[in-house]
Image (tube, rainbow, N blue to C red):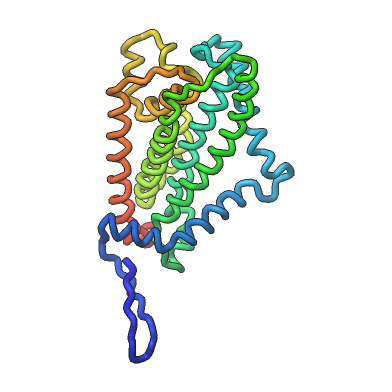
Amino acid sequence: MVSGRENTSQNTRITHISARSESSASRLKELLQYRDFIVLWTKKTLTLSYKQTILGPLWLIITPLLSAVTYMLVFGRIAGIRTDGIPQILFYLVNNAAWRLFSSCFQNNARTFTANANLFGKVYFPRLSIPVSNLFAALILFLIEMAIVLVVFVWYLAKGAVQICWQYLWAAVPAVLVIAVLGMSAGIIISSLTTRYRDLSVLVSFGTQLLMYATPVVYPVSQISDPFLQKLILLNPLSAPMETLRLALFGSGMVVSWSLWWSLACTVLLLVCGVRIFGRVERTFMDTV
């Protein structure tokens, strides 16, 4: 916790830093005070992503297109998975963008303490500003990928192959926010646990790959014929916002009310628990990292 008071006689300001626990309101206030740092860290994250590469920012366009084409060949042509009437290139572009949003928030924040231990030991700033910065960086990259989706969408719109679903379009923003917050919340929980249990960091990449196949990224939920398996997939908190995003953009998605409420409840629970655990660990993590 940071507090300050001014000594009027000497016209100096004394800043006191303590490890006392803070309320959510004071944490939010402190994050707002360090908003410039959050902006700078976000820029740093985006810059370092493609620094010292030959193609540089062009990878932002090449990567999603290559991934979408690969999924079209493997899952569309070879596996024969249908996409509920959505053009395959659009289906996989949107799903990949949403999945990368989650995985970036999750994996980058899962290394918060271990990757920044040296910095945390030298300078004080709200530790939660790093996960927030990673969240903003992932959202910016997501918006860039959605710009590619928009170009392809306009082309199919001109052909009459798709149409704008104005009645559901508003749901895209909350669906994206739920995906991003889920990734950040799960990431800071893992980051807090890895200060004591380092082997969890090894499971992050492997677990993320497995989770992708338990999430409707390469297939829509409607294509699952087994009712039990379908309910099992819908229990995944990421399934509802993924389906909602496709419904908002293309008018095609299996949105079930109980799955939506379950996803929202999991998001709030993970966020609250993640912030509390993160706050406790940040006061003592230098003794264990």
Q: Is residue 168 above or below residue 192?
A: above
Can the viewer see residue 215 in this picture? no
Q: Residue at x 37, y 26 (%)?
A: 240
Q: Is residue 43 above or below residue 30?
A: above
Residue 4: % across, % down: 33, 75
Can the viewer see residue 136 in this picture? yes
Between residue 18 and residue 285, name the one nearer to us: 18
Image quarter hosting the C terminus? bottom left
Residue 61: % across, % down: 65, 35
Between residue 119 and residue 248, name the one nearer to us: 248
Q: Residue at x 27, y 40 (%)?
A: 269
Image quarter hosting the N terminus? bottom left
**In which quadrant of the rendered view does residue 23 lie?**
bottom left
Residue 189: % across, % down: 35, 45
Q: Residue furthest bottom?
A: 9
Q: Residue at x 69, y 44 (%)?
A: 56
**In which quadrant of the rendered view does residue 161 lie?**
top right
Tell me if 266 is positioned left or right of 252 in this view. Answer: left
Tell me if 51 is positioned left or right of 273 in this view. Answer: right
Residue 216: % across, % down: 44, 22
Q: Residue furthest right?
A: 54
Tell me if 156 is positioned left or right of 259 in this view. Answer: right
Q: Is residue 64 above or below residue 81?
A: below
